[in-house]
Structure formats: C-alpha cells, structure tokens
Amino acid sequence: MEFNGNQTATDVNQTKPIRCIVKLGGAAITCKNELENIDEENLEIVSTQLRQALLSSDKVVGMDWSKRPGISDIACNVAGFRDKLSVDSTNFIVVHGGGSFGHFQASNSGVHKGGLQQPLVKAGFVATRISVTTLNLEIVRALAREGIPSIGMSPFSCGWSTSGGNLPVADLSVVAKTIKSGFVPVLHGDAVLDDVQGCAILSGDVIIRHLAAYMKPDYVVFLTDVLGVYSHPPTEPNAVLLREIAVGEDGSWSITKPTLQHMNNQVEITVAAHDTTGGMVTKISEAAMIAKLGIDVYIVKAATSHSVKALSGELRAKIPDDWLGTVIRFSREEVQ
C-alpha cells in the first residue's frame, strides 16, 4: 500500500497505539432481508457495549445534538461537558458493513462489476453511496449518543480507489489525524472508483485488513449475526461452531478446535444473492491475513456477553471454555 503526500507507514504507526479495530457486520445491525431497515435494538446494545468496553468512564454525555424522527426535543446536554476536563477516548476504529443498505442498489445496477460509462451503473453508483452513507450517519449518531466521539469517514471521500477490484493504494493520513485528535473514525464499505473497470465495491472486511496492516491494533473484533464461523451454514443441523483457527506463515489455515473428521479445512459457506462483498468467505480470508500479522481476530455474535469479552480485550489472556465465538490467530507451528 502506498501513501499520498508525506504520510508514511512509520508516521501512521507512531501516531497513537490502536487498541482495537471493530467490524460491525451489516447483518448484525440491520434487518438484512428488509431494504434499508436498521435493527435499532441491536445497534443500541452494540453502541453501549462499545462504550463500556473501550471508554474509561461510565457516565454517558451524548454528542448527538440533532433532531431525531418522532422526538420533538434535541438532547443537547451542554452542562454535562462544562465540568469535564477531557472527553474519554480509547484509540479504536469502527468499520461497518452495509447489510440491507447498499447491496440492493449495487447488485441491481452492477456497480461491483464496473462499467461506469453505462447510465445504469452510474446511477447505481450514486444510489449505492446515498444508501451506505445514510447508514453510516445513523451508526455515528448511535455511537455519539453513547458519548463516543465518532466521525463518519467514507473511503470514496478519502480518495481511496481500487484497481481491478483490489485495493493497492489507500491514504490513511486522514484516519491517523482523526485518531490523533481524539476522535473515533467510523468507516464503511463503499462504492469507489476503479482504474481498470471504472468502479467497484470496496468491502468493510478488506478495509479492516489494510487498516490492521498499518495501524497495528492489539486485536480485531468482527461482530456478526451468528456466534462465529461454522463448518456448514448455521441453519443446517450438522453445523459445528469452529472455536479456533490457526494461520501459518504462508497464509494457510487449519481448524485447531474442535477436532473435526474429514474437514480438510473446507468450510461450506453460503452467500446471499444480493451480497456484492463476498459475505463470510471474504471475512474469513481477510481475518486470516490479519492473523498472519500476529494480530488476534475474534468473530463473535453482536450484542451478547461473548461480544463484550471480545471487545474488552480480556480474551487475549485466555479464552474461557464457556466463550462462544471463533478466534483466528497466528501460529508458528506448521499448519496441517
């Protein structure tokens, strides 16, 4: 990855130590089969858990001073900030998926396949960005109501672009400056320009891998709508939750817990027809690349007691037997 301007990888690493990068799975915070419908209850719980796990203060002083639909008053607690010497902040980054936002527009117009010169694709590009930025704003507002100093950041607006669907260049200087200033960047999967095919969809999972490579967080947490990675789609009766996956130096991986017969590292995964980002397939691939860097990755169901333990970092010391989720970590031993 290259950096524009004078920003270097060393500059990014020395900006501020990053505790955690959190991926909010689109299916965990939206009703994925209902167009542009946010799961308000889950989003509120996740926002509260993020505050409890990653901020030092239990006192909530909200930062969303905008009017909300159906509520006449604006929650602007100016007095709550007058006695504060500083705003609580632990250095972390949030990246979210689209869920029921963006995927419909992208898949129906073919944005993920390129061809920006076509009127339908161009219109779909605009429609996709309207949808995903709408969700981004609502997530930023939910986090802000919990006292998290969140700033929405779109990859397109940051100047990120792909080449043949891959992300070779991303300027992280704005992200680094945002963290240095005490804010929490909230990025999202986005429609971006592509120098080969005109346009493409940049998934949140790919964004996280690039952020992890240069920000070097202590750990990464994927919050999903299921307990973790399964041997088969979790709706099937023979599906088994994979507790631990080891990643070798060459990027190969193996299931280390539980011991499964005749698996040979093959995990059967389904991807929704409208999902233009690859779903769990991309998630596992990107998580393995992060783990290869020596950064533990936890895939866990959002809004549960298991996600609280992952977010707080307590799993880094020991994985409790009663914890339900998937940990993906680097192993120097040869992966079978």
Image: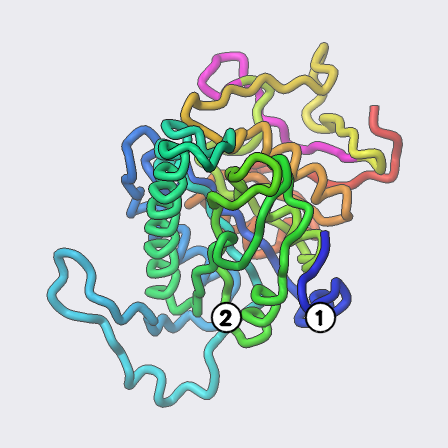
Q: Quadrant of the C terminus?
A: top right
Residue 50 appears at what percent x and percent y? 46, 57
Residue 73 appears at what percent x and percent y? 14, 69
The magenta stretch spans which residues?
233-247
Question: Is residue 194 rendered magenta in the image?
Answer: no
Is residue 60 in view?
A: yes
Report whether 202 appears left or right of 273: right
The residue located at (45%, 34%) in the rendering is 111
Q: Main secondary structure of the magenta part?
A: loop
The residue located at (46%, 78%) in the rendering is 87
Name the residue type under label 1. Asn
Nearest the viewer among 77 and 243 is 77
Nearest the viewer among 57 and 193 is 193
Residue situated furthest front in the rendering:
117
Q: Which residue is mark 2?
A: 183
Name the residue type under label 2. Phe
The residue located at (12%, 56%) in the rendering is 70
Is residue 306 in view?
A: no
> Which mark is first along the chain, 2 or 1?
1
